[in-house]
Image (cartoon, rainbow, N blue to C red):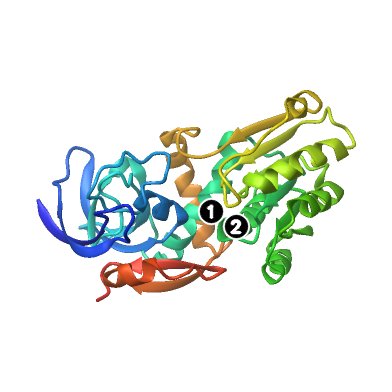
Amino acid sequence: MTIINAAVVTSFDQPPHYRDFELPAAEDDQEEVEVLAVGLHPRARSGASGAHYTSTGRLPMIPGIDGVARRDDGSLVYFAVDDDTIGSLAERTVIDAHRSVTLPSDADVVKVAAAMNPAMSSWVALRRRIEIRPGQSVLVLGATGNAGSMAVRIAKLLGAGTVIGAGRDRERLDALVDLGADDLVQLTDDPVDSARALAGRAADVDIVIDYLWGASTQEALVPMLTARSDRSRGLDWVQVGSMAGPTIELPSAALRSANLRLLGSGQGSVAGRDYLAELPALVDVIDRGQIEVGTRTVALADVERAWGEPDVPGLRTVFLPQQV
């Protein structure tokens, strides 16, 4: 076993503490690696609070679900892990060779660590949960968040003809035009007003990538279905995030009166092997600069302080375990 420094969760109602941790020895098909960069994703936060639906409640644990590391031979690798016990927010961790992909030697490790997780949500949704066809139209609900803005770009990269971005932050909403958005819908604090705007501008889309859920989706879904010019034409509504709430009430008539296919995309609905199969292609488009995200870097030793700081719109925090 190896004693490492890591962000360690000892209580779900406290931030992780920077302390030592006993890393178990690598087993078959595993290897111990030096962690270089780890993004602070919402998924990492929910795991550290015990709130994610995959949490087993075991403590202590190291949060973090992915990162960039250096192997003993000097090669760089992007890896994914389960944060049930041994996550990625550590100076060293144990990875599964089958859940990693080798990176170019000159890869920007901070950029890859920041972008892979938020980009994966829409990339996998459009390639594994549904298969987007060239020319289809896509609405991204919650497009002003990091993952949502990437979804606008990814939908275009995967062949969407029209992409509509919907979000609250006017400045970030306007910036989506540079990422490929063809139309924008300003959401407000009033879900009814927002629903009216969505029904007027986005009712005839083929696909919705939904990062909001909650009241935003509950109020918008029926008006959008009612406003469709052809209700028998299929609408794939893919639930990815729940920034506006975890539940909705859905009238049964919504499912009978329109050709609505409501599905989710995430751990459990997509097989692990399918996620892994998408890694090389996604790494390639990120490394070539086709998907970008703003970053700020923080030494892992400062994790307790940084954990409580509010997220900065447009920036993804990336921890550097080797920086002291």
Q: Which residue is mark 1?
A: 119
Residue at left 25%, top 49%?
86
Identify the residue at the far right of this view: 229
Residue at left 23%, top 61%?
6
Q: Which mark is residue 188?
A: none
Most foreground residue, 312 or 208: 312
**Label 1 vs 2, first from the N-terminus:** 1
Q: Residues within 10 Å of mark 2 (few under 14, many from 20)?
A: many
Residue at left 36%, top 73%?
298
Would you place residue 6 above or below residue 60 in this image?
A: below
Q: Which residue is mark 2?
A: 150
Most foreground residue, 305 or 32: 305
Q: Could you tell me which secondary element the residue under label 1 belongs to?
A: helix
Q: Give how far across and how far down residue 294 sits, in percent.
A: 52, 70
| Amino acid beneath label 2 | Met
| Amino acid beneath label 1 | Ala
Q: Residues within 10 Å of mark 1 (few under 14, many from 20)?
A: many
Residue at left 73%, top 60%?
188
Would you place residue 206 above or below residue 171 in this image?
A: above
Q: Are marks 1 and 2 in contact (CB under 8 Å)?
A: yes
